[in-house]
Amino acid sequence: MKPITDAGYKLLHEGCIALSQVEANGMKIDTKYINRAIIYTSNRIDKMLYQIGHDKIFKVWKKEFGIRTNIGSREQLGKILFSVMDYPCSVRTKTGRPKMDEAVLNTIDLPFVRYFLKLEKLKKVRSTYLEGILRETTDGYLHPFFNLNTTQTFRSSSDHPNFQNIPIRDIKIAKLVRRAFIARKNHQVVEVDYSGAEICNAACYHKDPRMISYIKNPKKDLHRDMAGQCFILPRKEITKEIRYCGKNIFVFPQFYGDYYLHCAENLWNAISQMKLKKGDGQSLYKHLKSEGIYKLGACNPEESPMEGTFEKHLQEVEYDFWNRRFKVYGQWKKDWYYNYLKKGYFDTLTGFRIEGIYKRNEVINYPIQGSAFHWLLWSLIRIQKLLKKYKMRSLIVGQIHDSIVSDVYKKELKNYLEIVKQVMTVDICKHWKWIIVPLKVDIEVAPVGGSWYDKKGGE
DNA sequence: CACTGGAGCCAC
DNA sequence: AAACGTGGCTCCAGTG
């Protein structure tokens, strides 16, 4: 893994300098708030511990493990549930222990298990995030590290603390943690990200005309279309939730190298969780039945799927996806991997060579992932230079793979956004002629006096 | 007491 | 033929 062009070397050299400035800038932290949040979370943890301590199952647990009883041990809980209480254990880890993650535990309908999961979540929030952030904060500022030398793909990483995995999906936990990240006085938090960075970047490699047309035409929607195909639904019946499944259980996994068996299982399971406008998941199973799909199927890699099963249907959807809809993309994947096998390395569009022993999915994913980050890195370097050149007070304070987090002086907001848009969607295309799709950014701004949690989209 | 691998979970 | 890519952090359990 090394730069093979001067431009590649220069990108990392300047990137390193720019990110060190980002580290030095740091983000302002509301430490008083964090201390309150830790107390609040601790109270909730105590409540859960009380609930657990007064449950009959905990008596069984103590009887089994005595002085070794550890409420944080999933292994011990597994023994109680699957050996002592005789719940069936359907999944095991690769070392043969019962799998005890959230998905498995959600299938066991006991208040005790619900308390346990709640407790684990709260402990994670407290230790990794609230306490982790506070530990690394000095004089009210947090300075996470951003590394360019640690990843296989030429992406970046972040540590002490990791700024790139602060909760956002679970809205309550997101608020609890992100509320701590604030802007300097008379500044506001602004986050700008490339929309569909990896999909757009992939298109620059494979140049599939149908993918490019999806990217160029805002009326087209790949995730909606694929959700429709997976569930055999017309466009108008695709709810937000169904589209979400198309995106996160079919399209992205397929891009990363997943295959129909896995997708079929996950989509089928997702149906049971769905709450639809017209009825619930059951109505979707019924709908599939009316289309001749009666069950999931065995999903055994050794056997070919049976007619009338969902796995058979997904096999057809997948075939269509790579051999008809995105035929050029599908062929590119084959060629790209074949060329790697022949040469023993592959080169990225941003000027790097990746050499060594890699699996098929790695060979296909690394260049896309790495180059997508390099769009961001190039943009960050340039934006920072311009902020300096115009003697602006706004500062870049963080970076998350395809987004830039800044602490923007309120009077500079308009200028800042102009610079960012110019660099990220216009200048970069002049710098890298191989960018053959139009680039778009999503902008989110928090009000002055607000926190990172308060960022809102729409220009 | 230090260290390590596994498992889990957070992000893109 | 194979089968979801990249990271970091925490806790547990086992080892030396």
Image: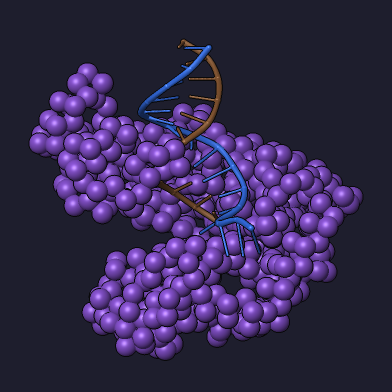
Chain colours: A purple, B brown, C blue
User: Considering the image in quadrants, where does the N terminus of chain A appear?
Assistant: top right
Nearer to us in this view, C7 or A94: A94
The image shows residue B7 at horizontal and vertical percentages of 41, 40
Viewer can see residue A2:
yes
At 69% across and 60% down in the image, what residue appears?
A: A364
| Residue that sits furthest to the front in the current view | A303
A126 versus A426 height, above or below: above
Residue sticking out furthest to the right: A6
Horizontal side of residue A9 vs A411, given as left or right = right
Q: Residue at x 18, y 31 (%)?
A: A61
At x 19%, y 52%, the residue is A109
Choose top left, top right, bottom left or bottom right for residue A240: bottom left
Q: How many marks?
A: 0
Please state if A101 lies on the left or on the right of A345 as rendered: left
**Residue A35, how many percent across, how many down?**
35, 33
**Residue A94 located left or right of residue A404:** left
**Spot occupied by residue A78 in the image (x, y as percentages of width and height):** 28, 38
Towards the viewer: C5 or A449: C5
Q: Is residue A53 visible?
A: no
Q: Residue at x 38, y 45 (%)?
A: A92
- The residue closer to the viewer here, A308 or A11, is A308
Q: Position of residue A271 (x, y in %)?
A: 33, 71
Against A373, is C16 above or below? above
- Of A29 and A159, which appears nearest the observer? A159
Asked if residue A258 is positioned above or below residue A28 in the image, the reply reads: below
